[in-house]
Image: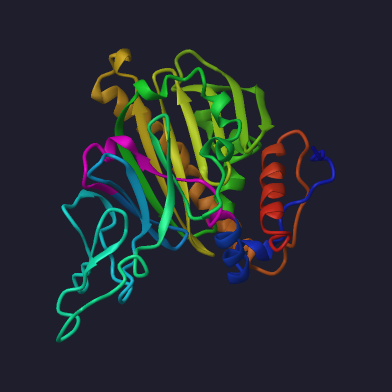
Amino acid sequence: MTSAQSETTLRAAGYHEPSAFAAERSAIFGREWLLIGHMRELRKPGDFIAEAIAGWPLFVIRDKQGALKGFHNVCRHRAGPLVEDGCGHTGALRCRYHGWLYDTDGRLVRRPDFMDGSDAFDGTALALKPIAVAEWRGFVFVNLDASAGPLADGLGDLVTATADIPIERYQFFRRQTYDLPFNWKTYVDNYLEGYHIPLMHKGLARDLDMATYRVENANRVSIHRSGAREEGTYQGLFMWRWPNNTIGVYGSGFNICRIQPVAPRALRLAFDFYFDPEAGLSVEAKEKASATTCAVVEEDFPMCEIVQRNLEAGVYEAGPLSPKHEQGVAYFHRLVRAATGGTVA
């Protein structure tokens, strides 16, 4: 693997030019396995999860046989939605615009009052556009690429890095979302280095032994470890998984984040918090732990906004990356360059 010694950041234009965003949308988010939700949201037939990911409206539904099916949430008639964004339940996949009806295999079943006489049509030719769906330890992933490989390959070394964490046992507590005015890579860059922690996160720096902070890049993951104080919230284990997930581990739980590109200068963060029921934590203790994480996350937002502004100012082109502190950023940038064929260089 190339040393970070001589590596530089991505070009500033890649953080705001529409062409760069379009390249990432196609080459990264159109081909990778993306987290969309959890099996707890899909317990019975008719349950669905719907969300727009990098501009693609998608949904996953549990069919009558219990299998998970995924589709673009776009009717083949006039592009209406089949289900509302979020989690819910439906007895029928009926377009909310004109009432076209589909089965859970995506095949068109009925288009009411479409013609005056006989309405013969090919339901398969007018079927919903499918997407791949797979599950890992309770989490549900989708892939828009018809030739996508197995989910395990997409997860890379996240599988081994989390092997000792009893993820299945943990129970969902709450979700916190943020809509933010900067590029998704601006946020990932910030997450992937501890260089800024002593200056910007005084509370987190007190919880961690920053002298022991280390970053290890593996296959599609960057693992951050640090010694932690007993009385602190954090266990000192943070992970990023290509392209857009982060995981923070506590002694009694963890959070997982989805970093969702919305536009060249906009993203949505969705943090889900899970806790170990065997730890016996009170609701107040869970609230405190999740609030502590959110407070640290929110400390980064003003700086990310300023960095985004400065990336667009026309003064900064690229900068050197520290081989001591910014190995994670360097690895992320290599993956972006490789995925986009150097379009975002």
Q: In the picture provided, is 30 more to the left or to the right than 289?
A: right
List x then y, in percent, for residue 307.
60, 56
In the rendered image, the residue lying farthest to the bottom is 116
Q: In the picture provided, is 185 more to the left or to the right than 113?
A: right
Q: Quadrant of the C terminus?
A: bottom right
**What segment carries the magenta color?**
28-48
Whether 340 is drawn above or below 166: the answer is below
Instruction: Inspect the magenta stretch and tell me whether residue 299 lies in it.
Output: no
List x then y, in percent, for residue 146.
51, 55
Q: In the picture provided, is 329 more to the left or to the right than 116?
A: right
Residue at position x 55%, y 32% in the image: 239
Residue 254 quadrant:
top left
Instruction: Inspect the magenta stretch and tell me whether residue 37 lies in it.
Output: yes
List x then y, in percent, for residue 67.
31, 41
Considering depth in this image, is 310 or 5 the residue closer to the camera?
Answer: 5
Whether 103 is drawn above or below 98: the answer is above
In the rendered image, the residue lying farthest to the right is 6
